């Protein structure tokens, strides 16, 4: 337990949750943030207006929502299809409520996996700023977090098929699935990996259907992504939290961010191989964010499993309380990344990933003794 009273933890957690979600009142003035683009994807799923960026933007303009390329695989549009039956404003609030429910459910699972009290785990989930940032901006990282927690719980309770299925659903946003795929490879978890890979095949077929039966959707999507995503990366540079995302902002050759990503992933292999499966899976979510080619602040909702591992005793006192309090307070500063130009969430993610990799450096044994 943290070196804080139960009452103080409860008060701070609820306060952090309130501060995290209060910017949502500005959503109507900001055209529902990212939600309009996701709502439009659901509305165009199954037709020719989804993958082709020109047609998609024209459809969005005609229906009065924010105009953007749908950066997810087309299959993901089916997740938003039910919301498209509602007006965009109503669907935004419905989706926000569902995301809060996902956070609560993730907290309940975390309590079981990490041996935390249900109240502490749920409060910790609701108070985590990247998760509330996702709700405020109309994004869906809490859903991805719930999938990650299902996968971790399944690994902890020896349910390989369920772990593989949860990781497979994460293909709706492939960068978030990479950590689990790497973990399955490193640990030789072939059943989990097989299910996850098969899930990728299912996602391809669902994408064909979402693209109106176009079997060449991938070529079209890649062509449009090459045009839209670099500009989007420049526009949202202050929100980047991964090492390659930060390196890409520097005047360096494109190979430098790629090398940084690969180097970080390789450095994490000893820990992913040697740590207990719950710790390794929690760290895989964190390292996936740090080494991923494209990760924004709200996606650090997936750092929550690592926070739970710390809370459960992964770090001893007094550093556990210091680290957790600092991370929760610093996380709220994501709102000011446009001023700082480097997201506070990037500092949290990269510092935590770097510390964990150092903890499992190859020349040190599992208990810290030099080999």
Image: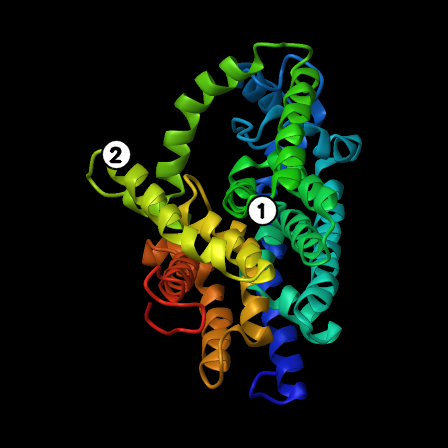
Q: Which residue: 70% across, 16% down?
A: 209
| Whether residue 40 is visible | no
Query: Where residue 52 sits in the image (x, y, percent)?
Result: 55, 15
Query: Where residue 199 sits in the image (x, y, percent)?
Result: 67, 31
The image quarter containing residue 216 is top right
* Crowding near the residue tagged with mark 2, few <14, some 14–19, many ≥20 C-alpha atoms within 10 Å: few
Judging depth in this view, the residue of 8 and 25 nearest the camera is: 8
In the image: residue 192, left or right of residue 280:
right
Real-space Cα separation, disc 2 to disc 1, in angstroms:
40 Å
Judging depth in this view, the residue of 122 and 363 nearest the camera is: 363
| Whether residue 256 is visible | yes
Q: Which residue is mark 1?
A: 29
The quarter of the picture where the C terminus appears is bottom left
The image quarter containing residue 218 is top right
Q: What colour-coding does the image apply?
A: rainbow
Q: Is residue 77 above or below residue 371?
A: above
Q: Between label 2 and label 1, give the one nearer the viewer.
A: 2
Which numbered disc covers residue 114?
none
């Amino acid at each position: 337990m943290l070196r804080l009273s139960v009452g103080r933890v409860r008060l701070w957690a609820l306060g952090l949750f309130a501060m995290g979600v209060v910017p949502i009142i500005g959503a109507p003035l900001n055209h529902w943030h990212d939600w309009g683009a996701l709502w439009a994807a659901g509305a165009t799923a199954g037709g020719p207006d989804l993958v082709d960026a020109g047609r998609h933007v024209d459809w969005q303009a005609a229906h009065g929502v924010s105009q953007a390329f749908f950066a997810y695989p087309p299959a993901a549009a089916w997740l938003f299809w039910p919301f498209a039956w509602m007006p965009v404003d109503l669907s935004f609030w419905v989706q926000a409520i569902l995301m809060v429910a996902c956070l609560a459910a993730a907290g309940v699972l975390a309590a079981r996996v990490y041996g935390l009290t249900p109240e502490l785990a749920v409060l910790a989930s609701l108070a985590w700023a990247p998760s509330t940032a996702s709700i405020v901006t109309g994004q869906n990282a809490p859903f991805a977090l719930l999938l990650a927690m299902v996968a971790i719980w399944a690994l902890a309770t020896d349910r390989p098929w369920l772990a593989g299925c949860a990781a497979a659903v994460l293909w709706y946003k492939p960068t978030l699935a990479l950590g689990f795929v790497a973990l399955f490879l490193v640990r030789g978890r072939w059943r989990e990996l097989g299910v996850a890979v098969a899930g990728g095949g299912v996602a391809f077929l669902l994408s064909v259907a979402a693209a109106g039966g176009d079997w060449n959707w991938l070529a079209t999507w890649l062509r449009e992504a090459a045009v839209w995503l670099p500009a989007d990366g420049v526009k949202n540079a202050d929100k980047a939290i991964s090492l390659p995302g930060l390196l890409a902002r520097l005047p360096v050759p494109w190979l430098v961010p790629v090398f940084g990503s690969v180097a970080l992933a390789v450095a994490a292999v000893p820990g992913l191989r040697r740590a207990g499966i719950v710790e390794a899976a929690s760290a895989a979510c964190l390292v996936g964010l740090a080494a991923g080619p494209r990760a924004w602040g709200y996606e650090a909702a997936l750092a929550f499993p690592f926070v739970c591992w710390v809370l459960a005793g992964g770090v001893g006192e007094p550093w556990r309380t210091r680290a957790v309090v600092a991370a929760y307070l610093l996380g709220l500063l994501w709102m000011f990344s446009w001023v700082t130009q480097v997201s506070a969430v990037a500092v949290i993610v990269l510092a935590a990933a770097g510390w964990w990799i150092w903890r499992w450096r190859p020349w040190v044994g599992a208990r810290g003794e030099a080999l």
